[in-house]
Amino acid sequence: MAAHLNVELKARCADPARVRRVLEAAGADFRGTDAQRDVYFAVEDGRFKLRQGTIERSLVFYRRGDRAEARRSEVTMARLEGLAPAALDALEATLAAALGVRAVVEKRREIRFVDHVKFHLDEVPGQGSFVEIEAIDLDGTIGEERLRAECEAWRGRLGIAAGDVVAFSYADAALERDSEPASSTPGRSS
C-alpha cells in the first residue's frame, strides 16, 4: 500500500458501552475484536511497528505529532495478513536484530468503520480503556481539512471531552510506565 494520510484522535474512554451504542446507531460496520501485539522498533524518525493480530497484521511506518487533538499522521503500510505465523515471527526477529526493539504493546481492539472513518475501542493492560478515531484518505481525494472536521464531529458525537484526548502513543506510555516509580500514573503529563 502506498503512503496515505490519516487524521487521528485518541482519548481515554470511561464508557465503552456508550461509544458502542452510538456507533451501532450510526450503522458502523463491526469488523471484529482483534488481539494485537505491536512491536515498535528503534528508528530515528517517526514510529515503525510490526502488528501481529488475529484480524490485522501489518508493517507500519508513520509520522505523527504528539498533541492532545485530532492530528495528522502520514502512514506507509504493508498488509501482512497472508503471511504464515512463522514468517511473521522471522520478520520480527530480523527487524529486532537490525533495529532494536523500542517497546511492545499488547491490546484488545474492537474495530468498526463508518465509510472511511475507522474506530477502535482498545483495552490496554496497565493503561486502561481508549477510543480512537481515524479518518483515512487512501488516495488523496478527501484532504486533511475534511478529515480533521470528521474527527472533531465524531468526537462530539461520541461525547469525548477535550480533557480525555491524549497525546501519547501506547508505546510511549508503556516506556514511561516502565521508567517511573510504582506510584506514578502512566501516560499522564505533569
Image (spheres, rainbow, N blue to C red):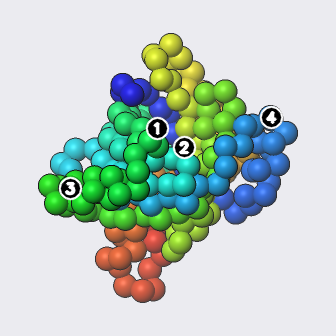
Please report whichever mark, 3 or 4, sits nearer to the chain's N-terminal start: 4
Disc 4: CA contacts within 10 A as few (<14), some (14-19) or many (>=20): few
Amino acid type, label 4? Gly
The answer to whether residue 152 of the structure is visible from this angle is no
Dot in front, 2 or 4: 4
Dot in front, 1 or 4: 4
Amino acid type, label 1? Arg
Q: Which residue position holds label 3?
A: 94
Contact? badges 3 and 1 (CB < 8 Å): no
Q: CA distance from mark 2 to mark 4?
A: 20 Å
Contact? badges 3 and 2 (CB < 8 Å): no
Q: Is residue 112 above or below residue 37?
A: above
In front here: 100 or 74? 100
Q: Is residue 3 left or right of residue 150?
A: left
Callout 1: SS: strand
At x 44%, y 80%, the residue is 184
Q: Which residue position holds label 1?
A: 71
Which quadrant does the C terminus fall into?
bottom left
Q: Which mark is residue 9?
A: 2
Contact? badges 1 and 2 (CB < 8 Å): yes
Q: CA distance from mark 3 to mark 2?
A: 32 Å
Q: CA distance from mark 3 to mark 4?
A: 41 Å
